[in-house]
Image (cartoon, grey):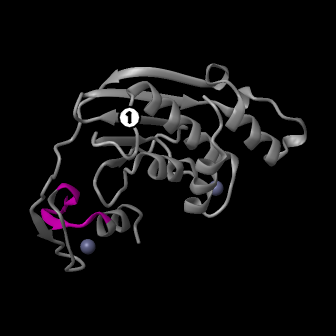
Amino acid sequence: MKFDQGLWEQATAFHGHECPGLAIGYRAALAAMERLGVTRSGDEELVAIVETDACGVDAIQFLTGCSLGKGNLLYKNHGKQAFTIANRSTGKAVRVYVDASKLPVENDDRQAKMQAILTAPEEVFCKIEFKEIQLPEKARIFQSHTCTSCGEKMAESRARLKNGQVVCLACFDNYERGW
Ligand SMILES: [Zn+2]
Ligand SMILES: [Zn+2]
């Protein structure tokens, strides 16, 4: 795929700076979208599953249009540079795992690293696979519960039980850590 300087500049404007991490997400998003045959502007409804919360996620959001607020960006805390883009209308999904350490650069030069990520052939540093995944329903409306500890409301899926009382995750975590 030909490098699109204009698109990259828009992605860096969205993220706030250019960096190797953003480049990883940028390549992953394009690799997946190309294989799915979708574009951001298309009518296809995309879902993105990100396995990291690092810089690359911003490129995924920018290029796919998937966002946390829309409910079509799902975060799995695996600590991996892996990104899955799914097309809800066809059920097809592509997962891209990126290993930038396969692109050696001298002196750990960040700029050189970023350029290498942006321009190297995908097959050198990306593992790309078609996947079958179960997508969450479109609009999951949860019942809300009120935390017996702080009094704030939360979605039912986040509620936890502590000594038989309904509490929110924040209060549950504090309890776990013994605060
Ligand atoms: Zn960054
Ligand atoms: Zn609470």
Q: Nearer the viewer, residue 78 or 70?
A: 70
Residues shaded magenta: 157-169
- Is 9 part of what is drawn in magenta? no
Percent x, y of residue 66: 37, 50
Q: Nearer the viewer, residue 87 or 136?
A: 87
Quadrant location of the C terminus in the rendered image: bottom left
Q: Quadrant of ligand 1?
A: bottom right
Residue at image position (58%, 48%) is 7
Q: Is residue 47 above or below residue 168?
A: above
Residue at image position (55%, 38%) is 81
**Tag 1: residue type?**
Val
Residue at image position (73%, 43%) is 114
Q: Is residue 105 left or right of residue 3?
A: right
At mark 1, the secondary structure is loop
Q: Is residue 5 left or right of residue 60?
A: right
Percent x, y of residue 158: 23, 58
Q: Is residue 56 above or below residue 1?
A: below
Q: Give the residue furthest to the left.
A: 143
Percent x, y of residue 123: 62, 19
Residue occupied by mark 1: 38
Q: Is residue 128 above or below residue 143?
A: above
Residue at image position (66%, 46%) is 5
Q: Give the residue furthest to the bottom.
A: 151
On the image, which quarter does residue 101 sit in?
Answer: top right
Q: Is residue 95 above or below residue 51?
A: above
